[in-house]
Amino acid sequence: MLVEICVSCVKALNLASKFGADRVELCQELSCGGLTPSIALVKRSVALGMNTQVLIRPRSGDFVYDEDEKIQMMEDVVHYQKLGIQGIVVGALNEERSLDISFLKRLRMLTPNIELTFHKAFDDIDNWQKAIEQLISMKFDRILTSGCEVNVFEGKERLKEIIEFASGRIQILPGGGISPENIGKIIEFLKPNALHFSGTQKQRREKSKYFISEVLLVDEKKLKFLMDSSRRSSNRTT
């Protein structure tokens, strides 16, 4: 099974390398679903020789972007490619909660030689069958999804439908809310060829009078457990 780890800091990146992750998706601010990562983190990942996928998301909230945000995203896409990455992770919708086709085509034109993943904005789409056909026609490489639910376990029934509908024409990457408590059941039910998880835990940061918040930070034991569970599953199926 291919394992992609969602990485938001150097510690998580080093652990992903240590545990032999097949791929990393780089971002920051996991507590809001992830935003575009720092240049330093991307450079570090490339230097480690990791298969590096970079999330391009300029802000938290929905995935309907105005023209200024789209220009920012396109400039980021051009810039990060120069660092030697293997792929970009993006998502954009319109007011009707369907794909922003014209913008996504512009992004694909900017990325002819690297992979393109459509992220969990997919789970906001009403007509997922139509969206899959459109993403295939635009030559996207994969879709990151929780099966149109808050996490993979809740969305496993729909995920099975999505995997069967895609039928190998585009990679379906289950991700979101995979934990030590549910990974075994998810693998047993879906029998996926790839998984995406972060291995993080909530931590409260309160060494400031004004900026106190809960953040998601990598937990080494949790990440190792998820990696080991994925590898055991791969060994059983080979």
Image: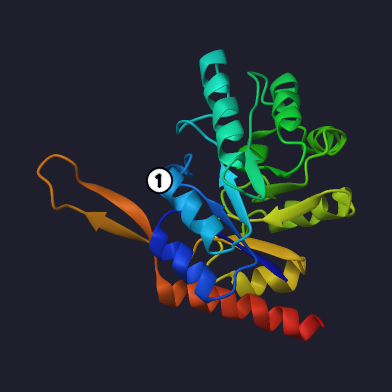
Q: Check the image and report above or below for 221 versus 204.
A: below
128 lies left or right of 165: left
For image coordinates 62% across by 40% down, the residue present is 81
Q: Secondary structure at mark 1?
A: loop
Residue placed under numbered mark 1 in the picture: 29
Q: Evaluate whether residue 200 shows in this view.
A: no
167 vs 90, nearest the viewer: 90
Picture coordinates of residue 109, whole percent (x, y): 76, 28
209 vs 18, nearest the viewer: 18
Q: Report the quarter where the C terminus lies.
A: bottom right
For image coordinates 72% across by 74% down, the residue present is 188
Query: Which quadrant would residue 235 be assigned to in this image?
Result: bottom right
Q: Evaluate whether residue 45 shows in this view.
A: yes
Q: Amino acid at mark 1?
A: Glu
224 vs 131, nearest the viewer: 224
For image coordinates 89% across by 49% down, the residue present is 169
Picture coordinates of residue 128, whole percent (x, y): 77, 37
9 lies left or right of 147: left
For image coordinates 42% across by 73% down, the residue present is 220
85 lies left or right of 105: left
